[in-house]
Image (cartoon, coloured by chain):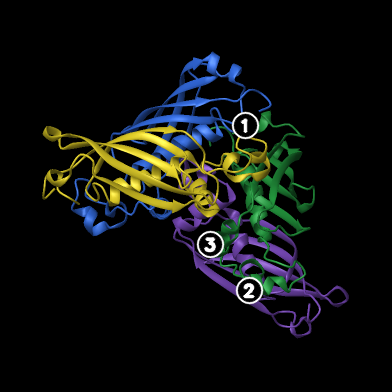
Chain colours: A yellow, B blue, C green, D purple
């Protein structure tokens, strides 16, 4: 991971995935979230969204992927996350999670990042903020 | 799902799972969060946590399981979630996600729920709040 | 789980899932049932069913889901299951497993349940019976 | 697959697997059977079985593996299965599913097979019978 000192306000990183039916089904199985909105097409046809959708928290997983593997990367201590779910993701849609540093608190080695998930067509899926801490070097 | 009108402040529901290595590995694969803290034991031995830990957002998945399958259950529209990560979960630890209604905003059919994930030994893993909306009957 | 005493003849519960390709492939991997009818589209095109189908026993898994999580629910001791496979399930079809109490044997705390899996279009997939036992309270 | 005509009463085939925690967790996710007996160690400690156990129907999956891949093998039409669950399987135990032809009904090209799942220590896990049909050659 980059040293805390080398991270600049405005730095950003992203992760993109086309959300598959198998992603949603596997996520349902691991988390226990068997809400029929995710796994029952007949039920889902009758909802506001007219078909099965991904779990909102799957998008949070993509944010976690950016924080944990890219910016700041391995070593990050994840302190908090706010998520506003703005639009659902249908199977086959491609989304990009982007994290951008907007604040540094040097005394605590903390970063605040703007965290967004956006569809390929520009629709915002998730808006929010993450706070992470970086360990001292060698820790 | 219970009708909005039938939900009372103080109602709560829970989901419990022993977090397995396979949960964490599967979650890593689906979300792309391949942070070595989760999947590299040799790396993880050298961290603050002295071994591999589950993704914080997996706990958020258990919260989503409660909201989407139990309280309020199917039909819930998930508007927002705040998560404070207080302690890591090691493989083999059993955690319980609990959601408790703390506010109702009738005009918008919105509920605020306190959302916690706690280990079997009482350690708090996640604290936070969720806001959800319930559709009108028949929607 | 409901107490044995509170379960009535005629009580029923269901679980519905749209059966995905990933369900069938994952089920194949875990059980070892790599029959080409399930995982080889070119082979399957030449069969009576004209394409890949789900494992019959996957439907039995949905019956187990109802028994183990809903009726009677956690604590159930599963004694036996009869399954008649009446029709195959294709990928993307939605099925509902329903279990209905048809007999109680009080001396042994046993229930017999009619167990069915039916497609959304009304086609019967599985017919059969389950026998379960409920432990004494506190056991 | 062997031709119907070449199968003899007494023929048998087997499939063996050490049942892992990940098998059980994946099976739970695909089937929706999140019974805490399978995924909550703290709950399971308080049951008759003193810890998490595999789903009984997972054993039925191993029987299906034998029928669908070995005897009779690909092309088999699975008509019915009876299962008596005699003992639970704990994580890490090795089980063998064996299917043995005990009857042939030539006019209908049907076979009855004795289907057993037995642990490495000799404990019977499942007893039962399967009935399968074989298509005419070229079908």
Using the rendered image of the protein, determine whether residue D120 is visible from the camera's viewpoint. no
Disc 3 with disc 1 on a shared chain: yes
Rendered location of residue D97, percent (x, y): 59, 68
Q: In this rendered view, identify the residue nearer to me: A20 or A40.
A: A20
Disc 3 with disc 2 on a shared chain: no
Instruction: Identify the residue under disc 2.
Output: D69
Instruction: Identify the residue under disc 1.
Output: C2
Quarter residue C35 falls in = bottom right
Cα gap from disc 3 to disc 1, whole angstroms: 32 Å
Q: Residue furthest bottom?
A: D6
- At 39% from the left and 39% from the top, the residue drawn is B59
- At 31% from the left and 42% from the top, the residue drawn is A99
Q: Secondary structure at mark 1?
A: loop
Mark on residue C30? 3
Rendered location of residue D102, percent (x, y): 75, 74
Residue A79 is left or right of residue C100, and the answer is: left
Q: Is residue D26 above or below residue C135?
A: below
Cα gap from disc 2 to disc 1, whole angstroms: 40 Å
Sort mark 2 into few (<14), some (14-19) or many (20+) by Cα contacts within 10 Å.
many
Sort mark 1 into few (<14), some (14-19) or many (20+) by Cα contacts within 10 Å.
few
- Give me the chain letter of mark 1: C
Residue B137 is left or right of residue A7, and the answer is: right
Rendered location of residue D45, percent (x, y): 44, 43
Quarter residue A60 falls in = top left
Q: Which comes before the other along the chain, label 3 or label 1?
A: 1
Q: Secondary structure at mark 3?
A: helix
């Amino acid at each position: 991971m980059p040293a805390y000192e080398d991270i600049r306000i405005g730095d950003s990183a992203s992760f993109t995935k086309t959300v598959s039916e198998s992603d949603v089904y596997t996520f349902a199985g691991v988390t226990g979230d068997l809400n029929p909105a995710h796994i029952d097409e007949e039920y889902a046809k009758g909802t506001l969204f007219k078909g099965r959708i991904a779990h909102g928290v799957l998008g949070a997983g993509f944010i976690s992927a950016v924080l944990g593997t890219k910016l700041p990367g391995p070593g990050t201590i994840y302190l908090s996350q706010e998520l506003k779910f703005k639009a659902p993701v249908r199977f086959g849609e491609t989304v990009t999670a982007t994290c951008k540093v907007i604040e540094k608190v040097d005394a605590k080695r903390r970063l605040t990042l703007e965290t967004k998930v956006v569809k390929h067509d520009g629709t915002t899926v998730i808006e929010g903020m993450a706070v992470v801490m970086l360990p001292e070097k060698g820790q």
